[in-house]
């Protein structure tokens, strides 16, 4: 992604990052790091992944993210949406399996743009500049 204007990069939080290389939380986090994105990991049960500090909550991050990616069960995504609302975060990407109609409606009714039913790794492999377009 060398053609990305680094000034326009988003700050991204991956909620559900895992130390387990088989889990999608790990794969999404690694993929975004590999693509040169500014990405923070969030998981209250993990401390370090790929040499990066992992935070317990979104509000603990050094910077407020522009985009939150959920790789957690729908019940956890509901809590993440509440945190996004309170922090003023306006974009959430719900990885397949982390969404529910209830949580999508709640996010959208609170002014949050939601992407769902699409894998961020697949979509960004098709369009390198996708994250800049959100």
Image (spheres, rainbow, N blue to C red):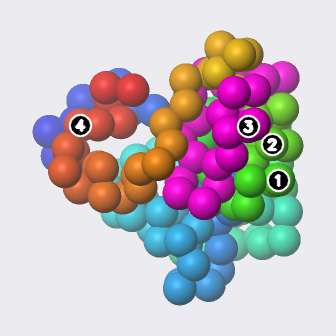
Left or right: where 21 falls relative to 104:
left
In the picture, the disc for residue 103 is 3
Where residue 27 appears, x then y in whole percent? 47, 71
Report x, y in % for residue 117.
47, 48
Q: Taking 109 as reference, is 123 above or below it?
A: below
- Helix, strand or loop at label 4? It is loop
Of circles 3 and 4, the one toward us is 3
Looking at the image, the residue that sits furthest to the front is 101
Mark 2 secondary-structure assignment: helix
Local packing at callout 3 (Cα closer than 10 Å; few below 14, some 14-19, many 20+) is many
Left or right, 106 with reference to 24: right
Residue name at image x 53 percent, y 84 percent: 21
Distance from the alpha carbon under mark 1 to that under mark 4? 31 Å
User: Which of the two labelled residues, at mark 3 and mark 4, occupies the earlier sequence position?
Assistant: 3
Which residues, given as a range, are shown in magenta? 84-106
Q: Which residue has dot 2 on it?
A: 78
Relative to residue 30, is residue 95 drawn left or right? right
Q: CA distance from mark 2 to mark 1?
A: 5 Å
Q: Residue at x 48, y 63 (%)?
A: 28
* Marks 3 and 4 close (CB-CB < 8 Å): no
Q: Is residue 3 left or right of residue 41?
A: left
Measured in 3D between alpha carbons, the distance from the residue under mark 1 to the one under mark 3, in whole angstroms, is 9 Å
Q: Tell which circle, 2 or 3, labels the residue nearer the N-terminal end.
A: 2
In magenta stretch: residue 7: no
For disc 2, the neighbor class at 10 Å (few under 14, some 14 to 19, many from 20) is: many
Check the image and report above or below for 117 versus 48.
above
Q: Nearer the viewer, mark 1 or mark 4?
A: 1
Q: Which residue is mark 1?
A: 75
């Amino acid at each position: 992604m060398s053609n990305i204007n680094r000034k326009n990069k988003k700050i991204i939080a991956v909620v559900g990052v895992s130390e387990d290389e088989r889990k999608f939380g790990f794969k999404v986090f690694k993929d975004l790091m590999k693509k040169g994105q500014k990405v923070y990991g969030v998981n209250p049960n993990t401390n370090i992944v790929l040499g990066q500090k992992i935070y317990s909550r979104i509000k603990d991050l050094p910077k407020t993210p522009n985009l939150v990616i959920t790789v957690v069960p729908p019940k956890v995504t509901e809590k993440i949406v509440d945190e996004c609302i309170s922090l003023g975060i306006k974009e959430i990407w719900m990885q397949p399996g982390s969404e529910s109609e209830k949580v999508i409606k709640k996010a959208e009714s609170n002014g949050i743009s939601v992407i769902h039913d699409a894998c961020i790794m697949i979509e960004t492999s098709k369009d390198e500049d996708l994250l800049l377009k959100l």
